[in-house]
Amino acid sequence: MKSPLLTLTSVFAVSALALTACAGTENDDAEGGAEDTGDETTGAEDSEADAGGSEEDGILAVVDHKYGPTEVPEPEDGELSVVALGWSDAEIALALGVEPIAVHDWLGFGEESHGVGPWAADLVSGDPEVIPRADAELDYELIQSLDPDVILNVNSGYDEEEYNRLNEIAPTISGPEDAANFNPGWEAQTQLVADALGLSEEGEDLIAQTQQSIDDARDAHPEFEGLEAVTGSKFSEAYGLHTEGDMRWDILQLLGFDMYGPAADIADPENFYAEVSEEQVEVFDADIAVLFPIGYSLEELEGDPLLASLDVVEDGRAVLLDGDGPLVQAFSAGNPLSIEVVLEELTPQLAEAVENLD
């Protein structure tokens, strides 16, 4: 275990790795949802009150989450073996100074990047097992062979059968009690990961540090306040609108933007995105739009005739991002390390777009 709470500004060296496995994430949340198990839990916001243990009782932490309280034992050798399966769970652990022994590579960063974003790759000193993302079920035999002390599955699809199988292998931490699939919220996810690692206070510090960065960016751009915005993507023959619970929208809201009314009207509170048909493309015609392609090139996005016909695009108020670029990777990852990258690189582009408002 490394020293906790690495300084975030030390990981801003972003390499140009390609985003190869983003397509399909929008569909995962629609399949399966955890049923109410009847367990009394307090949610991630209060879990730090119950997290923690001592060497005397042999418990590193007790963490309340979607499936009830879970005890994480104190590792006998003093080194906590962590398998990070949830989206961005590994990057949060790394930000707290804990290097997982295995990483589920949600965004296809690859073994060269150790399954994490370029903003976090330099924090890996060992050689963790990189578990490729696949539509099939998890490789439980592989996970069991790693003999983990704890499994992080905080940002996931919250499938109860999957959780039970993982929990048979090792104590497993899921998402907040009331979270929808792949929608734990960045603060709750960060705190749950920290609690599971026995680093509750460090988690609170990491959240506060990230929130301060967001607040500083918002304060630096008062012109964002109250403008209506959207974030979305083009994929296949349709489009997707990112909504509350998806950091690709949440970061804009945290910076002071409001969701464009027609977009808010089609948002599904149970999902972090909404499908947008060709007939509905005007939901992107807000004051400001951030759009990127999935499975397409930036040139194809720019050449999309329906998007090109929107006032927000014609007037230069749309920020069009390269789907294979590191900024979109960071935009999609939604954890404290990647949020810092987004604030550094996207905020100036938003400011330029706002200048084009009448």
Image (cartoon, rainbow, N blue to C red):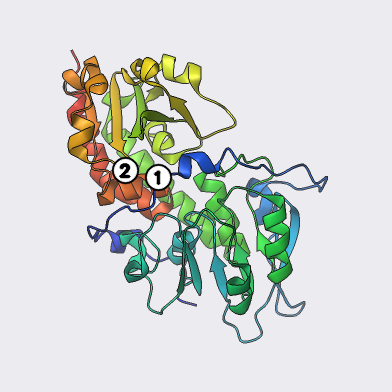
| Residue located at (73% from left, 59% from top) | 164
Q: Residues within 10 Å of mark 2 (few under 14, many from 20)?
A: some
Mark 1 lies on a secondary structure that is loop
Taking 200 as reference, is 41 left or right? right
Viewer-nearest residue: 63 or 275: 275
Is 9 left or right of 24, judged from the image as shown?
left
Q: Residue at x 60, y 31 (%)?
A: 270
CA gap, disc 2 and disc 1: 7 Å
Which quadrant holds residue 35?
top right
Q: Pointer 2 and pointer 1: residues touching (CB < 8 Å)?
A: yes
Residue that label 1 marks: 23
Q: Which mark is residue 295?
A: 2
Q: Residue furthest bottom?
A: 77
Measured as percent of width and height from the top left, residue 27 is found at 51, 40
Kind of residue sitting beneath label 1? Ala
Q: Secondary structure at mark 2?
A: loop
Q: Is residue 110 above or below residue 308?
A: below
Q: Nearer the viewer, residue 160 or 27?
A: 27
Relative height, residue 277 to residue 234 (above, below): above
Judge by depth and name the residue closer to the eye, 85 or 275.
275
Identify residue type, mark 2: Gly
Q: Quadrant of the C terminus?
A: top left
With 43 as the anchor, is 243 left or right in this view? left
